[in-house]
Image (cartoon, grey):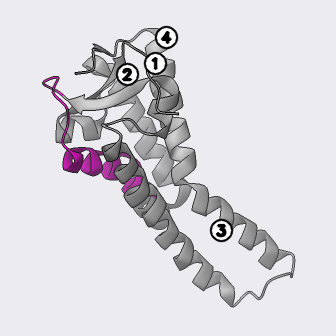
């Protein structure tokens, strides 16, 4: 069993949690960057504008595959440690301190990053995404052990690996 330390509100723990989130968010948003490049190609006259709608839906599908399926599967298969968590030495466990099941981790990761990015981005554009992540950040700052809205819903929390064993 891995020895862990609960997250506190120290600057080190706050920055580790924040940077892990940023790494995971940037990876989940990769299809959006590709879509932006296609948008620039359409605006510059290098690509047929009729392809724009197809590219939009293709990027939403790619965001689902990357942000929901790949991110959550990777985190579940690595015992609660996402790409960002691997870089900062944090992982997800159940609130009672036991290892979280793969289905719990997959649900948590999907609800925390992937689905808000797709759903709020599609219906409310960037403003919806920003509001969700700002509110989620405020909840994490105000709650014990930096638990987000989704962590409260599914009963998980982030912890530090005391041994600082990174996957990468």
Q: Residues within 10 Å of mark 4 (few under 14, many from 20)?
A: few
Mark before the other along the chain sequence, 4 or 3: 4
Magenta residues, start to end = 95-117
Residues under numbered marks 1 and 2 in contact, where contact means CB atoms less than 8 Å apart: yes
The answer to whether mark 4 and mark 1 are in CB contact below 8 A is: yes
Q: Secondary structure at mark 2?
A: helix
- Residue with the mark numbered 1: 14
- Where residue 38 appears, as percent x and y from the top left, is 73, 72
Instruction: Find the distance from the CA under tag 4 to the CA under tag 1.
Output: 5 Å
Of the residues under marks 3 and 2, which one precedes in the sequence?
3
- Against 103, is 48 above or below? below
Name the spot of residue 87 as percent of width and height, x first: 52, 29
Q: Which residue is mark 3?
A: 35
Cα gap from disc 3 to disc 1, whole angstroms: 32 Å
| Residue 49 or residue 131, whichever sits in front | 49
* Residue at screen point 27% across, 41% down: 150
Q: Is residue 109 magenta?
A: yes
Q: Secondary structure at mark 1?
A: helix
Is 127 situated left or right of 92 in this image? Answer: right
Q: Nearer the viewer, residue 77 or 51?
A: 77
Secondary element type, mark 3: helix
In space, the residues marked 4 and 2 are separated at their CA atoms by 11 Å
Q: Give how far apart the Cα atoms at labels 3 and 2 are.
A: 33 Å
Of residues 134 and 72, the one drawn nearer to the viewer in this rendering? 72
Q: Which residue is mark 4?
A: 11
Q: Report the disc number at residue 141.
A: 2
């Amino acid at each position: 069993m891995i020895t862990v330390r609960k997250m506190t509100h120290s600057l080190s723990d706050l920055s580790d949690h924040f940077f892990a989130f940023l790494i995971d968010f940037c990876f989940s948003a990769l299809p959006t960057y590709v879509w932006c490049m296609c948008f620039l190609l359409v605006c510059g006259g290098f690509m047929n504008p009729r392809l724009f709608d197809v590219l939009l839906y293709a990027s939403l599908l790619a965001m689902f595959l990357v942000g929901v399926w790949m991110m959550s599967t990777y985190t579940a298969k690595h015992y609660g440690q996402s790409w960002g968590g691997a870089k900062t030495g944090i992982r997800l466990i159940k609130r009672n301190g036991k290892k979280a099941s793969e289905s719990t981790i997959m649900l948590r990761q999907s609800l925390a990053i992937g689905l808000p990015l797709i759903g709020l981005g599609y219906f409310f554009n960037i403003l919806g995404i920003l509001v969700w992540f700002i509110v989620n950040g405020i909840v994490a700052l105000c709650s014990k052990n930096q638990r987000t809205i989704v962590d409260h819903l599914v009963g998980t929390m982030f912890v530090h690996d005391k041994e600082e064993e990174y996957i990468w």
